[in-house]
Structure formats: structure tokens, C-alpha cells
Image (cartoon, rainbow, N blue to C red):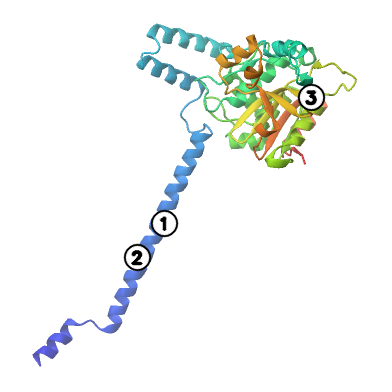
């Protein structure tokens, strides 16, 4: 009798046991769902922060802050004297105040040297077309990792300022501007009504950030200056081995507008071309037609140090030409965009293009 009572008293009714088990299971499922939601939220936050850092909108500062931080590191490592730090800081603050680039990363004279080389030395070139004189600008420590779009604009502008056709459009830009000034110019184009979607993406602010810019921002800036330009989207390869022969063909047609000119070296009045691909942008300033019937683009890369480019400005040979020469096999990104300038806009044309930029649609090839 005792053992029966003892056994009966220690056991739970079957229904109650099942209810407790169900409650524990439900609690476990709920806890797991909460954990998964928190983990997903954490990953989403981290991914967003990575994107912010990648595109320079993480609040870590812009050109000025990066410049000061890098100079402070150089002083701490003993690579820069405090007196040099204070001088360079004062020079930078002066450039910022005037909005004009200090030209420390500029290399000039390359296109002129190349023109002479092609006329006198190159034996394997049938014809070559060159933009009007273009200076090379290098991404320095102040904008390394994010400044390529701004440096390419400086290259384009260095050529436009030499060309009387665009004098009226650029009357307020007598010199090549500093990167923060270019950021202000793009913000002004947004305030004027160009590319509201792009403005929204950047929260209408580039000043004080390390935000990357691309073809749409360059187009908006140029068009706001009353320059007639277009965006062409080479959205897929058109040749074997993921190459882009249609891009080369388009560049050739752009430069070879004067079909009657049969000179070996054609120094055109065409501005250089902005060339964008995923993660980077460069400047096309000419194209070679070789005797073996292949073509090579002549490209300035803002990632190429000034020390290297200065070699090319003094002595051209097959080795130094590698700095600027790109064959079809050297352009194998899936997609390329170009921004090309071809004239000046009337007030009515500028208004129409501003309206059209409310919904950006690039011309696609093919």
C-alpha cells in the first residue's frame, strides 16, 4: 500500500506533463526565432556599415580629415618633420579656401610628348587619334581609395580649359578645382534639379565625405555647366573572351569624326572620355589603330602614381607606353559606361536634359 501511494504521489498526470512539454517547446521555438532575428539584424547592420565605409558615407570625414590624419601618421612615424606638417597643412587650408587644386599630383605634357613620338618613332602604328592636351591627376594619400571619379573630372577639365569652344561654359572655373570644390559643384547640380535619384542616394551631400562618384554624377555636373554630353552603357561583352570590341568601335568613331583627315597622328579638338567600370574609373584620351588591324585605347589611370607618369612625359618607349596603352584583352569587366562631351547646350536644351534626368536612362550598346 505504501509503495502504491508513494508511486502515485510522485507521478504527474499525463495531460499536465504533455502541457509542460509543449510549453517548453514553444518557448524554445520563440527563443530561437528571437535569436535568429537578432542575428539577421546584426548582420544587416554590419553589411550596411561596410557599404557606408566602402562608399565613403560613414561619417569618418572627407578630403580634409583624411589629409590631416595621414600627415599626422607620417609625423608619428618620423617620416615627416613637424615643420613640414604645419607648412603642408597651411597650404591645404589655403587651397581649400580658394577652391583650386594645388597641382601636386598633376603631370602635364604627356599628350604632347606622345604626339611627337607617334610622328617620329612608332613603326607599328598605322594611325592614332588624340584628345586636345590632357593633364594626368593622381589619387594622393588625401583621396586614395575613393577619389578616382573626381580625379578623372580634373583630367577632363584640364583639356576643356584649353579649348575655346567651352570657354563660356567654364568662365567660373578658371583653374582646375580641388576635390571638395568638385563635391560642391555636384551638390549644386542636384539643387538645380539634376538627377534627384542620385541626390537622394547621397542624401544630397558629398562635402565632408569620402563618397565615390560615378558616371551619373559626372554627367549631372557637366550638364549643369551647359556641356552637351551623353552616357553610353556597354552593359555586356560583345566579343570573345569577355571583351568589348563595340566599346573600341564607339571610341574610334568618337575621335574619327573628320573622315577626310588622313594624317598618321590626328590631334583632335575632342575632350577626353570618362570611362567607368565596377569599382574604378579612368580617362580615355586617345586610340591607336595598329598595322596588324588591332586597336588600343590610350587611358590615364588616376591610380597610377605621378612618379611613373613623369617618366612617360620625358621618355616614351614600349615600356613606358604600357602605363597608358590598353588592348581589348585589358578591358574585361562585364560592364562599362562612358561619359562623352560633344558641344555646348543652349538654355532650352539644358532645361530638357534636366527634365530627362528625373529618370536616368543611358543609351545601351548593344
Which label is found at residue 36?
Answer: 1
- Determine if residue 77 is in view: yes
Q: Residue at x 38, y 63 (%)?
A: 30
Give the vertical position of 238 relative to 12 (above or below). above
Closest to the observer: 327 or 218?
A: 327
CA distance separating discs 3 and 1: 63 Å
Give the vertical position of 200 relative to 84 (above or below). below
Tag 3's secondary structure? Answer: loop
Tag 1's secondary structure? Answer: helix
CA distance separating discs 3 and 2: 75 Å
Give the vertical position of 271 relative to 362 (above or below). above
Closest to the observer: 292 or 12?
A: 292
Residue 261, by quadrant, is top right
Q: Which residue is mark 3?
A: 291
Which label is found at residue 349?
Answer: none
Q: Is residue 218 left or right of residue 292?
A: left
Q: Quadrant of the N terminus?
A: bottom left
CA distance separating discs 1 and 2: 12 Å
Give the vertical position of 275 relative to 267 (above or below). below
Outermost residue to the bottom: 1
Residue 276, by quadrant, is top right
Amino acid at each position: 500500500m505504501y509503495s502504491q501511494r508513494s508511486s502515485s504521489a510522485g507521478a504527474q498526470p499525463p495531460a499536465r506533463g504533455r502541457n509542460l512539454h509543449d510549453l517548453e517547446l514553444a518557448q524554445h521555438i520563440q527563443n530561437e526565432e528571437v535569436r535568429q532575428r537578432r542575428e539577421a539584424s546584426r548582420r544587416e547592420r554590419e553589411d550596411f556599415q561596410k557599404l557606408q565605409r566602402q562608399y565613403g558615407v560613414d561619417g569618418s570625414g572627407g578630403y580634409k580629415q583624411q589629409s590631416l590624419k595621414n600627415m599626422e601618421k607620417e609625423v608619428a612615424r618620423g617620416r615627416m618633420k613637424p615643420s613640414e606638417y604645419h607648412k603642408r597643412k597651411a597650404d591645404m587650408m589655403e587651397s581649400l579656401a580658394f577652391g583650386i587644386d594645388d597641382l601636386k599630383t598633376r603631370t602635364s605634357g604627356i599628350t604632347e610628348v606622345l604626339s611627337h613620338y607617334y610622328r617620329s618613332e612608332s613603326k607599328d602604328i598605322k594611325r592614332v587619334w588624340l584628345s586636345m592636351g590632357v593633364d594626368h591627376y593622381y589619387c594622393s594619400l588625401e583621396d586614395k581609395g575613393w577619389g578616382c571619379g573626381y580625379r578623372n573630372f580634373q583630367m577632363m577639365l584640364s583639356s576643356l580649359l584649353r579649348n575655346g569652344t567651352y570657354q563660356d561654359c567654364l568662365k567660373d572655373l578658371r583653374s582646375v578645382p580641388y576635390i571638395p570644390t568638385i563635391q560642391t559643384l555636384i551638390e549644386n547640380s542636384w539643387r538645380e534639379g539634376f538627377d534627384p535619384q542620385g541626390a537622394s542616394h547621397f542624401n544630397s551631400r558629398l562635402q565632408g565625405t569620402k563618397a565615390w562618384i560615378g558616371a551619373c554624377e559626372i554627367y549631372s555636373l557637366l550638364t549643369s555647366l551647359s556641356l552637351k554630353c551623353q552616357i553610353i552603357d556597354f552593359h555586356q561583352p560583345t566579343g570573345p573572351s569577355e571583351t568589348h570590341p563595340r566599346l573600341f568601335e564607339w571610341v574610334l568613331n568618337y575621335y574619327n569624326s573628320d573622315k577626310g583627315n588622313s594624317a598618321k597622328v590626328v590631334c583632335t579638338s575632342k575632350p577626353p572620355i570618362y570611362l567607368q567600370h565596377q569599382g574604378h574609373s579612368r580617362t580615355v584620351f586617345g586610340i591607336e589603330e595598329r598595322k596588324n588591324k588591332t586597336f588600343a585605347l590610350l587611358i590615364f589611370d588616376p591610380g597610377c602614381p605621378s612618379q611613373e607618369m613623369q617618366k612617360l612625359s620625358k621618355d616614351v618607349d614600349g615600356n613606358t607606353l604600357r602605363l597608358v596603352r590598353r588592348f581589348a584583352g585589358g578591358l574585361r569587366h562585364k560592364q562599362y559606361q562612358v561619359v562623352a562631351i560633344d558641344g555646348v547646350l543652349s538654355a532650352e536644351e539644358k532645361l530638357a536634359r534636366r527634365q530627362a534626368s528625373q529618370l536616368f536612362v543611358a543609351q545601351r550598346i548593344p
